[in-house]
Amino acid sequence: MKLMNRISTYSIAASFFLVIASASASQAIKTSLFQQALQARQTAEAVQASLLSPRNFSKAMKFYAGAEQKFKRGRNLASIRTDLAAATQNFTKATQASKRAQRQLAALIKTRGDAEKVQAARYSSALWQRAEQKFSKAVGDLERGAHKSAKRRAAEADRIYRDAELNAIKSSYLTEARLLLARAEKLKVSKYAPKTLQKSRMLLQQAEKALSDNRYDTDLPRNLARRADYEAKHAIYIAEVVKSTRAKRLTTEDLILDWETPVKDIAAAADISARLDRGYESPTEQIIIYIEDQQSRSQRLGQDVNTLQAEVQQLQRMLGGVSKERVALSGRLEAQARVREQFEQIEKMFSRNEARVYRESKEVIIRLVGLSFDVGQSTIRPANYRLLTKVQQAIQAFANSNLVIEGHTDSHGSDTANYALSQRRAEAVKQYILANSRINASKIAAVGYGETKPVANNETTRGRAKNRRIDIVIRPQLTGY
């Protein structure tokens, strides 16, 4: 009897392990089979294809889901591969269409994002729904190649999104700020934090005036309304701290020492010794530099990972390809290595106050953080000549490359004015480079993007300064690349 029980137990265990082994083998097959389609799907999702190319993306998803169902039911592998090929093809189409939409509908996408940030769907739902319908139709027209219709509907959607954003700003930020100020009055905050409270009142007035003066430039009033909201909360907090300080009979020295603690803690996390014998300015600047360096390092590591992944894929194809393909791929890898070497040389040419140098796929981007213009102007100042001379030297490292000079602004001001200003500034840099070098005019273009491609928060002074920039995009034209 015991023997029979043991045999039964062994049989159950064997069956269990067979099931696990079978499931593991099945998952390995699926991973290999679906890999290309899954990568295409992830690429499409990364560029918001479900929003910007819904027809292609939906079609791709149907094929992908069909392949999953067939695999689950153990259907013919040839049929599954056919569905996956169709899914990959449509995901690729969706990615390409989304990138076109991001270029051609850049202003509309930004306007939609601005309305979304102020919760227009919640505070102005009827207008939001109308704008969404127009947006979908504009995207659909663009997907089908109906550019005129897409442009017309995009303009209509842009107007409705702005109206929805305006209503949301009035319903949320302005109302919230008014309620907070009323609460501050009841709490007698003006007795303890009069300056901060007055700042909130002034910002609220400026926001209301900005909304009245130019209802289609919502960036400034939105920012002012948020700041009014913040300063009202800030004033209430300060009043509570002052009351608590008086109740505990704390001295001014006690307060200073208490407020120095967070600076020390943040500095320690960055492995910086915070010396506060001359105030907080020096350690604050050290911390800012540390954060910016870490951001640059993180971006560089991301670029390196992407490059290495691409090279691994190429090496895999090289190993599995015929001799001609191997030669071509080998040449491409050598060209990429040359670009990396040149990139490192260019990076060393600029100080941190002059430029940041980035690599994105096959492009090298020189972000001219040290190049500035007078407010609303596009004339290059003599103080910038030295920096632009370095730019010319950097460009020469990539002989026969195509160049794009990109102009960008912050979000304050009208969209039309920002586009025009960014274009004029990009054109001014282009003309300076052409006048002082031997670059073929056909190899260099100037494009203004206005406020549509921010790299930092437009609601802070430092962020807006980063967004007002000129980017030099170098597109190497190397043999075998």
Image (cartoon, rainbow, N blue to C red):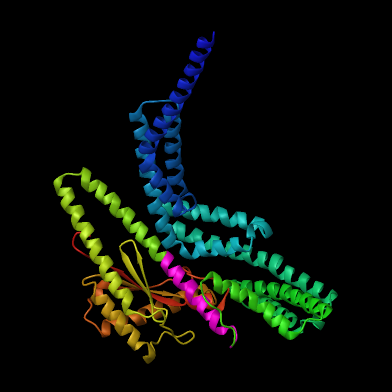
Residue drawn at point x = 21 percent, y = 81 percent: 438
Q: Residue furthest front?
A: 2
Q: Nearer the viewer, residue 108 or 347?
A: 347
The quarter of the displayed image where residue 261 is located = bottom right
The quarter of the displayed image where residue 257 is located = bottom right
Can residue 383 be seen in this snapshot? yes
Q: Nearer the viewer, residue 228 or 335?
A: 335
Q: From the top left corner, tell me how far across and down residue 423 is, in percent.
A: 40, 76
Q: Nearer the viewer, residue 270 or 290?
A: 270
The segment highlighted magenta reads 278-298
Residue drawn at point x = 26 percent, y = 68 percent: 341
Q: From the top left corner, tell me how far across and down residue 169 is, in percent.
A: 66, 67
Q: Is residue 458 on the magenta stretch?
A: no
Residue drawn at point x = 54 percent, y = 84 percent: 282
Which quadrant of the rendered structure holds the C terminus?
Answer: bottom left
Q: Nearer the viewer, residue 429 or 328?
A: 328
